[in-house]
Amino acid sequence: MSRACQYEQSESFGIVICEAWLFRKPVIANRVCYSFRDLVEDETTGLLVGDEWELQEAMVRLAGDPGLCARLAEAGFVEALSRYTWPRVAESIYKALEVDGVTSPLGPRGDHADRRSRPRPSTGAAVAVANTPSGAQTRPSTRRKANRPTADPRVD
């Protein structure tokens, strides 16, 4: 069985750990990193280590104990599916942004069902104006780009 080891000192979330869990791989993570300590439950969903010696011990443990690998991998898989799928993350963000009963226009589960009924902005009606570093305003080029299709010249 393969293993995943994430030994960063600083990480904002730890998506590599969640991806390893989704592939049912046991993980070893650095306990010094706050997000890994928050994400991985030591000896349950993975192994947390604090230095190179603990990392080496954890690697030897996993290499010699297939039962531990399977247990950590399965617990991580369950954790990833229960907390870190996109619908779950969207729901968590929605709940975090909900203040005093005020909700976002996406709906209670982050649904985008009303997207089709919303008017789309016109792409040709407005001309963008950009400021150059010198402060002068310029209009975007109207020349045809090589990859953009042109109108069929055979159609009048």
Image (tube, rainbow, N blue to C red):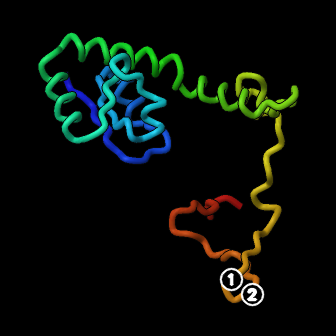
In terms of secondary structure, where does tag 2 sit? loop
* Residue sitting nearer the eye, 68 or 34: 34
* Residue sitting nearer the eye, 134 or 31: 31
In terms of secondary structure, where does tag 1 sit? loop
Give the number of callouts: 2
**Quadrant assignment, res 139:** bottom right
Q: Is residue 20 left or right of residue 36?
A: left
Residue ID for mark 2: 136
Q: Position of residue 39 (x, y in %)?
A: 46, 29
Q: Position of residue 66 (x, y in %)?
A: 17, 14
**CA–CA distance in space, label 1 to label 2:** 5 Å
Label annotation for residue 141: none
Q: Residue sitting at 48 percent across and 30 percent down?
A: 38
Q: Position of residue 96 (x, y in %)?
A: 71, 31
Q: Position of residue 98 (x, y in %)?
A: 79, 30
Q: Is residue 105 left or right of residue 16?
A: right
Q: Is residue 143 above or below residue 122?
A: below
Q: Residue sitting at 17 percent across and 29 percent down?
A: 57
Q: Residue sitting at 80 percent across and 33 percent down?
A: 104
Residue ID for mark 1: 132
The disc labelled 2 sits on which kind of residue? Ala
Q: Residue sitting at 46 percent across and 22 percent down?
A: 80
**Quadrant assignment, res 18:** top left
The disc labelled 1 sits on which kind of residue? Thr
Q: Is residue 114 left or right of residue 27?
A: right
Q: Is residue 39 above or below residue 34?
A: above
Tell me whether circle 1 and circle 2 mark residues in contact (CB < 8 Å).
yes
* Residue sitting nearer the eye, 85 or 71: 71
Q: Quadrant of the N terminus?
A: top left
